[in-house]
Structures are given as C-alpha cells and as structure tokens.
Amino acid sequence: MPIDLAQHIRNIPDFPIPGVQFKDITSLLLSPDAFNETIARMVDLAAEARVDRLAAVDSRGFIFAAPMATRMGLPLVLLRKAGKLPGATLSYDYNLEYGQASLEVHADDVPSGARVLIIDDLVATGGSLKAAAALIEKAGGETAGIGVVIELIGLGGREALADYDLFSLVTFE
Ligand code: PRP
Ligand code: MG
C-alpha cells in the first residue's frame, strides 16, 4: 500500500491566529517511513529537471532539502534569515503581511549560471519562495524549479510563482 502522506500531516486549527488551519509537518517527521517516502518522492520529481545545486529555505526547507541533496549527490545552498550566515552575503528584502523580511545567501555559493532547484516545506502565498528565487537570480544563478512538500490551494502561491516550474507532493484546500 502506498503511504498517504496527507494522513501524516497534522492540522492545527487557529494557529498562529484564529481562522488559520496550520499544516504541521512535525507529525510527518515522527514517522520514519512517511519521512523517507517524502524524500524519495521529492527526489523523483527533482530528477526531472536539470539541476546543479539545491537551495533550501530557512528553516523548515532545510529538513527536506538536506536528505535530498545527499541522495542526489548535489551541493546544498542555505538561504537563511537575516544575520545568520557568517561569510559575505547577498540579501533580498521582501514584504510580509505585516512588516518586512529578508533572505540571505553566501555570495560564493551560487556559481554564475548554476541551475538551482529551490526546496521548502510549504507554499502558501508564494512570497517566501518568490524571494528565494529572486535571491538565487541576484547571486547569478538560474532557478531550475521549485519543490515543496505541501501546497496550500487558494492563497495565490502557484500564481505568484507562475514563472517557475513548481512541484508539490500534497495539496490542501
Ligand atoms: C513558512 C513555511 C514557508 C512559508 C510559506 O515559513 O515554512 O517557508 O512560511 O509561506 P508563503 O508561501 O506565504 O511565503 P516561516 O516563515 O513561517 O518560517 P519557518 O520555516 O522558519 O518555520
Ligand atoms: Mg519556512
């Protein structure tokens, strides 16, 4: 029987604010079989594009991108929240619903023209992944595609990322 990954993703109502249905991956991570299956499926989909490097979005993207990188034999680039990377960085500022955020990358981690597949746990509005792609491009790379475990439908993420090939394993309304 194939594993139904959606069954392993817990729904937490009213987190972080009333009315939001939070899709919680911690329950998926507690099942080695479901976690392993998640990585295997992500690797299968990632293998459809020509990819030189993976880039992982801080912080939940790290959980999925790291095992993918070792299985695929690809370098792993970390896209981090501001002030975390010790070397020379490039940054990209973007708007959140309330306020601003920025993502940073080590300037040397993205060789000119490198095809980079960006990995995160989840797409909602697409704002984080749009910023991630803009950062890769600012650093001189090309966005080879975007892969997520969970796609929330109806929040505009796929539309916001229409310029990119986006794959997801599980969708929720
Ligand atoms: C969450 C999630 C995605 C992003 C999706 O990250 O892990 O990265 O939001 O939302 P969006 O499509 O509307 O941008 P969050 O910034 O909460 O931080 P975390 O990964 O460090 O938990
Ligand atoms: Mg995140």
Image: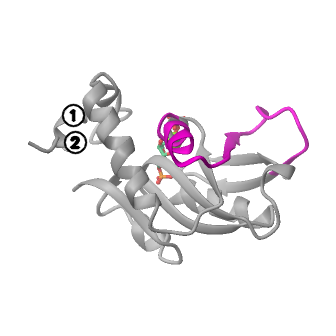
The answer to which image quadrant residue 62 occupies is: top right
Residue that carries the numbered disc 2 in the rendered image:
5
Type of the residue with mark 2:
Leu
Residue plotted at (58% across, 68% down): 144
Q: Is 27 part of what is drawn in magenta?
A: no
Magenta stretch?
63-90
Decide if residue 69 is on the left or right side of residue 43.
right
Asked which secondary structure carries label 1, the reply is: helix
The reply to whether the C-beta atoms of the residues labelled 1 and 2 are less than 8 Å apart is: yes
Residue depicted at x 16% and y 38%: 7
Judge whether residue 14 can be spotted in this image. no
Of the 4 image quadrants, the one containing the C terminus is bottom left
Secondary structure of the residue carrying tag 2 is: helix
Residue 73 visible at all:
yes
Tell me, for residue 8, which label it has, or none. 1
**Residue at the limit of the structure toward the left, as seen here:** 1
Q: Mark 1 belongs to which amino acid?
A: His
Residue 20 location, x and y as percent? Answer: 30, 42
Which residue is the extreme one toward the top? 30
Residue positioned most to the right: 88
Q: Residue at x 56, y 69 (%)?
A: 50
